[in-house]
Image (cartoon, rainbow, N blue to C red):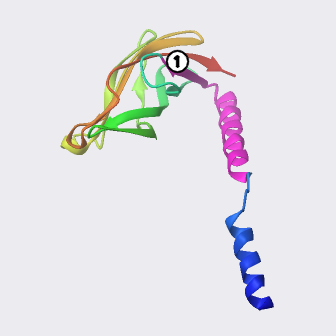
């Protein structure tokens, strides 16, 4: 009987594990990325979506020379076959910046057909402020954020 109680206590301890190390690690990763950006001269931008679901956000990095937008990440809701789903996604590729403007798309995989992810981005970057539109979709799966408006600012 004591042996069974020991197993029950052990099982309860595993079931009630409230380890908070994961969020701390995420904060540590954000801090590491911030330090890496500081060393490389990149600017990290974060911003809100104005016409999506509450809490939708976008982030990206601008290269030190101001010619490349990379690490684009959308964190929010989109519709997939009529169902609202939360996702965090972004392309592995980067967008060229010309005269403070971005206008283009990235498909992954390139020429991937109807199941490829497509990331459309329009942006105007002026110093530490940026505005634009974003759309992410997968045609064949019926997944789409639709055209979203955003504003972002550089974080130090």
Residue at the (57%, 23%) spot, across then down: 46
Front-lying residue, 96 or 54: 54
Disc 1 element: loop
Q: Residue at x 70, y 40 (%)?
A: 27
Q: Where is residue 23 in the image (x, y as percent from the top left)?
A: 69, 46
Q: Which of 74 and 78 is in front in this view?
A: 78
Q: Name the residue under label 1.
A: 66
Asked which quadrant contains residue 33, the reply is top right
Q: Quadrant of residue 47?
A: top right
Foreground of the two, 38 or 52: 52
Displayed quadrant of residue 77: top left
Above or below residue 26? Residue 50 is above
Q: Which residue is drawn at 73% across and 82% down?
A: 7
**Horizontal arrangement in the rendering, residue 132 relative to residue 57 (left or right):** left
Q: What stretch is highlighted in magenta?
A: 21-49
Dominant secondary structure of the magenta stretch?
helix
Tell whether 36 sits left or right of 72: right
Q: Residue furthest front?
A: 1
- State yes or no: residue 26 in magenta: yes
Q: Give the image location of residue 26, x and y in percent.
A: 66, 44
Seen at 72% across and 62% down, the residue is: 17
Q: Where is residue 89 shown, x and y percent of the image?
A: 44, 39
Dot 1: within a 10 Å radius of its alpha carbon, few (fewer than 14), some, or many (20 or more) residues? Answer: some
Quadrant of the image for the N terminus? bottom right
| Number of numbered tags placed on the structure image | 1
Residue 38 lies in the magenta stretch: yes
Q: Classify residue 65 as left or right of residue 138.
A: right
């Amino acid at each position: 009987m004591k042996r069974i109680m020991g197993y029950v206590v052990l099982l309860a301890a595993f079931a009630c594990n409230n380890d908070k190390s994961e969020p701390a690690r995420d904060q540590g990763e954000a801090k590491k990325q911030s330090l890496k950006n500081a060393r490389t001269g990149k600017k990290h931008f974060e911003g809100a979506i104005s016409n999506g679901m509450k809490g939708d956000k976008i982030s990206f990095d601008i290269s030190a020379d101001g010619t490349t937008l990379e690490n684009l990440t959308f964190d929010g809701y989109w519709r997939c076959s009529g169902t609202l789903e939360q996702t965090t996604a972004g392309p592995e590729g980067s967008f060229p910046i010309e005269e403070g403007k971005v206008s283009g798309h990235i498909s992954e995989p390139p020429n991937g057909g109807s199941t490829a992810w497509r990331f459309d981005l329009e942006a105007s970057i002026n110093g530490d402020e940026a505005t634009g539109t974003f759309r992410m979709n997968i045609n064949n799966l019926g997944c789409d954020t639709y055209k979203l408006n955003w504003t972002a600012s550089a974080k130090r």
